[in-house]
Amino acid sequence: MPMEQRGVDTVPEEERTSGPRDLVSILLGSNLCLGVIVFGWLPPSFGLGWWASVSSIVAGTVVGTLLTAPLALISLRTATNLSTSSGAQFGVRGRLVGSVVGLLLALGYTTLTVWIGGDVMVGVLGRLFGMPANGVSYGVVYGLLAAATVAGAVYGYRVLLAMSRVLAVGMTALLVLGVVAYAPHFTTGALPEAGGYLLDGFWPTWLLATVAAGLSGPIAFITLLGDYTRYISPARHTSRRVLHATWLGLVLGLLVPQLFGTFTAYAARAALDYAGPLVDASPSWYLLPLLLAASAGSVGNAGLMLYSMGLDLDAILPRASRAQATCAVAVVATACVFVGHYASTAQDAMTSFVLLLTAIGTPWAVITLIGFARCRGVYDAEALQVFNRRARGGIYWFRGGWNIPATVAWALGATVGLLAVSLPSYEGPLVAWTGGVDCSFLLSGAVGGLVYGALTARDVQAPVPSSEGTETQRASVTS
């Protein structure tokens, strides 16, 4: 299979050969990995019982999917990735906000996937062959996972899609075996080792789990969905079918692995750590399937995240090729794996990462969706590529390539979100006003959307050339 040559340029119609089923496959297959499974462990580690944990994950995933899924329709119309498409709202230079947000999201999830997958692999190899759990062992395993991940990401979308189709079937079978393996020790009660509710109350802890474990999953895709839908042709597939496929792919791709993580967390009594207890509680016959799940699943998920990181860096540095950008971010991601392994606990690192990125990413998504609704999905694909071609002008040039109202609205929303976040090591001053509950996601999205709406309420409409070259369709532009 040839290496993909496309970066963030417009995908020609003849290359847009994917369909809604491919979208479901890639969202399901790539997420059946330990990097997503481990999020199901967070509610039990916060001190919640089985039903409270399940309800928090389901509620957060459903709400997050309703917010995130429509973003997939933007790249269906623009034939480029979402951060580049956001130039219609932020300006062809201002869309770097989306590129940076996407880069940070993908970097964090790539790091987490390789970290957790590598830790489980080391534990399994220790039980099977007596391999010591020392620095050398972790270094070798992390390095092998990173190398395999880079290979898939560099070859690009077609290879990752083929891998996801295989993983969708193979990983599902491995998880079903896992349910059988861990079922004898399953319990529905809260784990005593967790030390009670993390936030000293049921509802604050439940809401934290809803955001950190449930909502964070769909939010992780706010800049990624366009990487796949840009290869779907709107001439052959309706927006409704693509939206339904996105809903199905996100809900299945996130709930199946996360609920497996919740189930195994209770079965393995994994209150303070997930990887170690998961390996220790595994029956001998499941060790090889667990090793396969840790390795193959991690490569599939991290490969997709790394692919997105390469696109985002390519959008920031147009002179670099997608392959060069992918290799560069792979080095950074691998370094972050070692930092995470030696310098932080899994629970604190995961909670802090997802809450911070949700706070700064949500207002960007809200502003981008408002713009999509205003222009009714009509974009000037050529004008979106001005920055990538190192040119100037176009209807999305605004002021020097930046749409100031959108950028200010995002900055204010992100700032409010950071002031309202509650982390294990930091509590924003606005938390006291929300009764000790982390409402950063709600506040950041609301402030970003309201400020953007207020600042652009008097915008006029400018014509956007249609696919036939006429100027009968229109998009929102700051006056």
Image: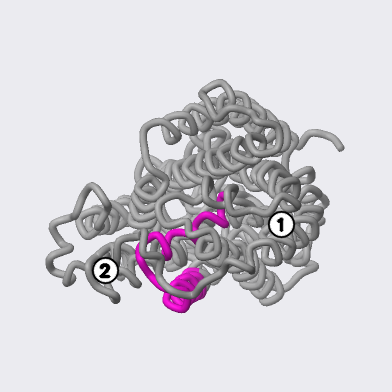
Q: In the image, 192: left or right of 3?
A: left
Placement of the N terminus among the 4 image quadrants: top right
**Above or below, comparing residue 66 to residue 119 in the picture:** below
Q: Is residue 82 magenta?
A: no
Farthest residue in the top direction?
Answer: 136
Residue located at (61% from left, 35% from top): 122
Of residues 474 and 410, the one drawn nearer to the viewer in this rendering = 410
Identity, as a three-letter code, of the amino acid under mark 2: Ala
| 242 displayed left or right of 100 | right
Q: Position of residue 355 (x, y in %)?
A: 35, 55
Q: In this orientation, does residue 8 appear?
A: no
Can you tell which quarter of the image residue 302 is in?
A: top right
Left or right: 241, with 471 as reference point: right
Disc 2 crowd, CA 10 A, few/some/many (<14, 14-19, 20+): few
- Percent position (x, y) of residue 349? 38, 45
Residue range corresponding to the magenta coloring: 35-64
Q: Position of residue 425 (x, y in %)?
A: 23, 47
**Residue 20 location (% of width, % of height):** 75, 66
Amino acid at dot 1: Gly
Q: Which residue is mark 1?
A: 29
Q: Nearer the viewer, residue 228 or 12?
A: 228
Question: Taking the image as drawn, is residue 312 in sight?
Answer: yes
Query: Which residue lies at the image location 54% right of the left edge and 57% below the top edge?
Result: 221
Left of 351 or right of it: where is 472? right
Q: CA distance from mark 1 to mark 2?
A: 41 Å
Q: Is residue 432 above or below residue 290?
A: below
Residue position marked by numbered label 2 in the rendering: 454
